[in-house]
Image (cartoon, rainbow, N blue to C red):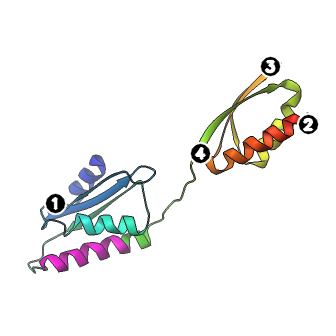
Amino acid sequence: MKAALEKVREEHPKATHHCYAFRMGLNGENYRANDDGEPSGSAGLPIYNQLLANEITNVLVISVRYYGGTKLGVSGLVKAYKESAKITLEEANIITRELETEIEIQFNFNQQNTIFTLLSKFDAKVLNFDANENCVLTASLKLTQRKHLGKTFRDAICFI
């Protein structure tokens, strides 16, 4: 965060304000809004509220302002920073990622085809495979698939 903010400050050294907000973590539990010298709550908070409204996490939005001699007042600042963040988020390429988890499976060598077929069905990615008489496999898969995969494995292995 600090590096990104410093980079923007270096790119816009004559700007009077570099206001920002960020939300980090799965649920946005790590967050901050900064007015950078603007009246309290008039810049960082409107930017942050746009992050909340769009339900976006793991993001930093910085709004750079050059003072041009016209005083906007608190309500004008709130509107300007809100719109700036809103337009930025509308134009941004937002990437949605599903949470993944790693699983470890231990099985007999003769069950290998069944295991790989099931992993493929659930789009799991094999990370490591130790093929011995007792095989050990590590894979990653979408968290939403984990409980379905577990039930499917139990059902399939009972019939092997």
* Residue visible at 62% across and 37% down in the picture: 102
Mark in the foreground, 1 or 4: 4
Query: CB of mark 4 within 8 Å of CB of mark 2?
Result: no
* Residue visible at 26% across and 53% down in the picture: 5
- Amino acid on which disc 1 is placed: Asp
Residue at numbered disc 1:
36
- Amino acid on which disc 2 is placed: Phe
Task: Please state the horizontal and vertical placement of residue 126, each as a whole percent of the image.
Answer: 70, 37
Q: Which class describes the residues within 10 Å of circle 1: few (<14), some (14-19), or many (20+)?
A: some
Tag 3 secondary structure: loop
Q: Which class describes the residues within 10 Å of circle 2: few (<14), some (14-19), or many (20+)?
A: few
Image: magenta residue range: 73-87
Residue at numbered disc 4:
100
Task: Please state the horizontal and vertical placement of residue 62, each as a whole percent of the image.
Answer: 28, 61
- Between the C-alphas of marks 1 and 4, the distance is 37 Å
- Amino acid on which disc 3 is placed: Asn
Residue at numbered disc 2:
159
- Between the C-alphas of marks 3 and 4, the distance is 27 Å
